[in-house]
Image (cartoon, helix red, strand yellow):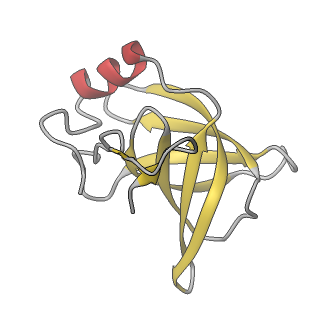
Amino acid sequence: MPEHSPNSRATIPRRPRHRPLDSNGVPVSVRPASDESRLLRGHLKNLSRDGLLLLLGEPLLLGEQLDIQLHDTQHGDEFHLRATVRWTRADRPGRHSLGCQMDKPADWATLGEMFVRGLLDADGPAD
């Protein structure tokens, strides 16, 4: 669904969302701000400057703030992001999709590193 401007009825195009090159997604570790001792493992399924889609084994609450580490297993590096859960969906038992909004847009240098390292598809946005 397109985003709408609060000041007009005009449709604003969504920012491109890029898929991981690995069809399984980019491995992530997620810490909810409400319980920093809790560490969840999952996968990133798409990313834009403003948001991301996560797959986790359990649901989180709407509005939950997250510290997210994306793991570049090939190069041994990590990328840190902060985001807030905006929607959730139970895909099947033990698999939950979470749509998250970045606390601040991902910077171009970070996105560029993800493209160069082969984490994200730089050729075209996700559908």
Residue found at the far top of this picture: 109
- Tell which of 77 and 96 is nearer to you: 96
Please provide percent x and percent y for residue 76: 42, 26
Residue at x-position 47% and y-position 47%:
52
Which residue is located at x 28 percent, y 48 percent?
Answer: 19
Q: Quadrant of residue 120?
A: top left
Give the left or right position of residue 9, taking residue 89 as reference.
left
Q: Nearer the viewer, residue 84 or 34?
A: 84
Q: Position of residue 11 (x, y in %)?
A: 37, 49
Image quadrant containing the N terminus: bottom left
Q: Quadrant of residue 69?
A: top right
Find the residue positioned furthest to the bottom. 93
Q: In the image, is 52 to the left or to the right of 86?
A: left
Counting from the top left corner in percent of width and height, residue 16 is at 30, 40
Point 22% across, 32% down: residue: 118
Q: Residue 62: x percent and y percent?
A: 73, 61
- For residue 12, what is the image quadrant? top left
Which quadrant is home to the C terminus?
bottom left
- The foreground one among 86 and 61 is 86
> Residue at the front extreme?
8
**Image side of residue 3 versus residue 101, left or right:** left
Rendered view: 22 above or below 90: above
